[in-house]
Amino acid sequence: MRRYLSGIIAVLAVMVLTSSSLQAKKIRWRLAMSWPTSLTPISSPAIKLAKYMKEMSDGKFIIKVEGAEKTKAALGVFDMVKGGSYQMGHTTSYFYIGKDPSLVWFTTVPWGMTKDEQYAWFYYGNGMKYMKKVYAKYGMLAFPGGNTGVQMGGWFRKEIKSVDDLKGLKMRIPGFAGKVMAKLGVSVVNIPGGELYTSLDRGTIDALEWVGPGMDIKMGFYKVAPYYYTGWHEPGAEALFYVNKKAFEKLPQKYKTMLVTGMKAVAADMFMENFADSVTAWQKMIKEMPNIKVKTFPISVLKAMKKATDEVLNEYAAKDPTFKEIMNDYMSYQKKARVWTMMSEYYYLKASQEVQNVK
């Protein structure tokens, strides 16, 4: 009997120790961002995701978020997640079109889809299917990570009156928009966000695009370059969460579900935060920064930009079958979606403006 009781006690002890070990075991991930931690709202999705994952898992899934000020490699997120030194990243896909041009479709292209159109393509069209296909080559998964909506066309030291004014201009503008501007004679550079103001102030660049009033006001660009142009190049710019595929596959299913759901939630929240920030910032700019001169590019310049965009996209499509396949699907969906966008958004806004202007 004594041996029997001793055996039971031993088994119970092992069970208690095993249970304690399981309770104590935590999943610890690191997430690298392409922007400083302080640069909200674009840094908000990663920070909020880490908070939500900790809360939903009762402290068992910890994500340590590191901004560009920590990693010192704002444009290195792709390689860090691919290599596994970070399990996650928060960046944009068009930073890395030098690695694979097809990546551009998952952030934005000039004259492309708006935020609403693009999200519909991601989740109810073929967007996520193509994203999975392209990133699988690099051992990664990618998920929408927050949209800015239509971005402004940038800050310029001088007014742009014709295509000739673009020639020789030094400008920071990433993605395929940079390739379009290069075709029009612009000297394009890709500079991390943390270095933009200094580059503009010192004359290293003559112009730059960033996001919109909510984020731009924090950067102080208006102090150096007063001409603020309306957008054409980023109609729905999407940040992305990168996830190392091997790390993801090791997760229990409930954590996979938490993570995917959490990413979707914080992505939606980023647009809301950015929109609200821009509303507030634009009012502040109107009242306190009268030197800002809001401009729209002349129609001759816009037409040249559209023509150059078509040329650039077709050049890549001719060389890359995957790029062409995604482009055709994207353009097809945009054509269908734009009909409803015009019916629902454009005509409402037009009617609203006309009614409010009636005296």
Image: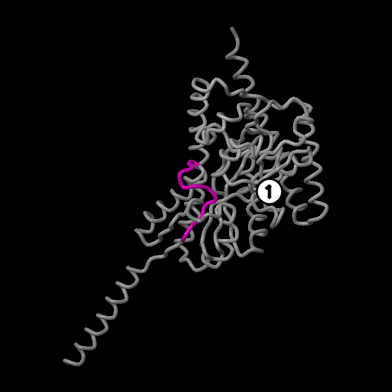
Looking at the image, the residue that sits furthest to the left is 2
For the C terminus, the image quarter is top right
252 magenta-colored = no
Magenta-colored segment: predominant secondary structure:
loop
Q: Which residue is drawn at 81% across and 37% down?
A: 307
Near-viewer residue (208 or 332): 208
Near-viewer residue (295 or 341): 295
Magenta stretch, residue numbers: 30-41
Q: In this view, does 8 lie above or below 63?
A: below
Callout 1 amino acid: Trp
Q: Which quadrant of the structure image shows residue 156?
A: top right
In the rendering, at what x and y percent does residue 333 appear? 71, 43
Q: Is residue 311 above or below residue 353?
A: below
Q: Residue at x 55, y 29 (%)?
A: 223
In the rendering, at what x and y percent does residue 207 appear? 65, 35
Looking at the image, the residue that sits furthest to the front is 202
In the rendering, at what x and y percent does residue 241 appear? 55, 53
In the rendering, at what x and y percent does residue 343 appear? 66, 29
| 201 relative to 338 in the view: left or right | left
Q: How crowded is mark 1: few (under 14 residues within 10 Å), some or many (20 or more)?
A: many
| 354 relative to 248 in the view: left or right | right
Give the number of callouts: 1
Q: What element carries label 1?
A: helix
For the N terminus, the image quarter is bottom left
According to the image, what is the colour scheme of the structure? one colour
Near-viewer residue (333 or 247): 247
| 12 relative to 164 in the view: left or right | left
Q: Which quadrant of the structure image shows residue 119?
A: top right
Q: Find disc 1 in the rendering and name its residue.
A: 105
Q: Which residue is drawn at 65% across and 46% down?
A: 190
Q: In this view, does 93 lie above or below 246?
A: above
38 magenta-colored = yes
